[in-house]
Image: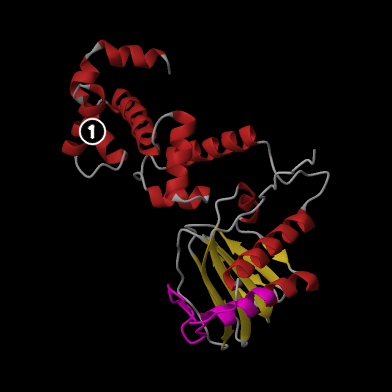
Amino acid sequence: MFHKYKLENLIVIPRIVTIHYLELDKSFSYEGEQHDFWEMVYADSEEIGIRAGDQTFVLQEGQAVFHKPNEFHSLSALEKPANVFIASFDCSSEAMRFFSQKIVSVPPEMRRLIASILNEARQTFLLRPDKPFIKRMEKLPSPPLGSLQLIRLYLECLLIHILREENSQTRPLFVPESEYSNNILKEIEQSLQSMIFEGFSLNRLCQRIGISKTRLYNFYRQQTGKTVGQRFSQIRLEEAKRLLRKTGHVGITADTLGFSSEGYFIHFFKKHTGLTPKNYLKGIAAAADSFTE
């Protein structure tokens, strides 16, 4: 009997969003954007200025940088005309975490893959260098057979070759699934803790973790049985109790936690405890809670 090997999918790209090859003039500067998919920027000639989140740096000729989903990013020419290749795409493969804000040098053999992507894209879409930030590429009426699949395969090959290049025996590239899940949960918890005094923002949380809203919701619900919103309310409630016991003042606690009004804070507190903040301070629950600190 012949044995059939199941093919592993290290990286799967289900959707291409945009592909561009831009010839930037020396004064080019883009104010920036953010979106819920990956973006690769490759400096084909000359250096370009890059902003990724709160970092700014120079991308050298022959280097590529990867912007993770929901990361604010921008680019600019550095007083010289420059050519740049940009590809944006959906990908939820765990291996993509390696590319988060990653700068890589692209050797000649990998540049041929980029050229192949661009070649297929030119035969498939009406590329508009004069409109580099369109949100929908116009498909040509009669693209070559299988061109979209080849774009996907070339891009997946490029990413896999980069992973191979960066991998080493002394430093494993990927962690076990259980450790990966634990690391993500720790990142989420730390991010939620940092939002206690500024308010919950799902967009900001996704940006910090580097995954989409849908994936974050499903992952956290599967791992904890709660939503991230429910967990944030729990964290904020615990801090509210601590501040009430420390200050004995409802208004100060509401202001410190960033509530828009004292009334809204009272509503929040009663919804989750069944008590008003003042009644909480009068009861034995506050005294019992203080024993655990």
Q: Residues within 10 Å of mark 1 (few under 14, many from 20)?
A: some
Looking at the image, residue 120 lies above or below residue 224: below
Q: Is residue 62 above or below residue 292?
A: below
Count of numbered tags: 1
Q: Residue 66: x percent and y percent?
A: 60, 62
Viewer-side residue, 77 vs 40: 40
Q: Work out whether 126 lies above or below 9.
A: below
Q: What coloring was used for the rendering? A: secondary structure
Q: Is residue 82 left or right of residue 192?
A: right
The image position of residue 254, as x and y in percent, is 25, 37
Is residue 130 highlighted in magenta? yes
Res 21 seen here: no
Observer-nearest of 158 and 241: 158
Q: In front: 154, or 244? A: 154
At a point 62% along the width and 69% down the height, the residue shown is: 151
Amino acid bearing label 1: Phe
Q: Residue at x 46, y 83 (%)?
A: 131
According to the picture, the residue beneath numbered tag 1 turns out to be: 268
Q: Is 137 left or right of 199, judged from the image as shown?
A: right
Whether residue 106 is visible here, answered yes or no, is yes
Residue in the picture at 58% in, 33% down = 182
- Outermost residue on the right side: it is 169
Would you say residue 235 sits in the magenta stretch? no
Magenta range is 116-144
Q: Quadrant of the C terminus?
A: top left
**SS label for mark 1:** helix
Looking at the picture, does residue 180 appear above or below residue 284? Answer: below
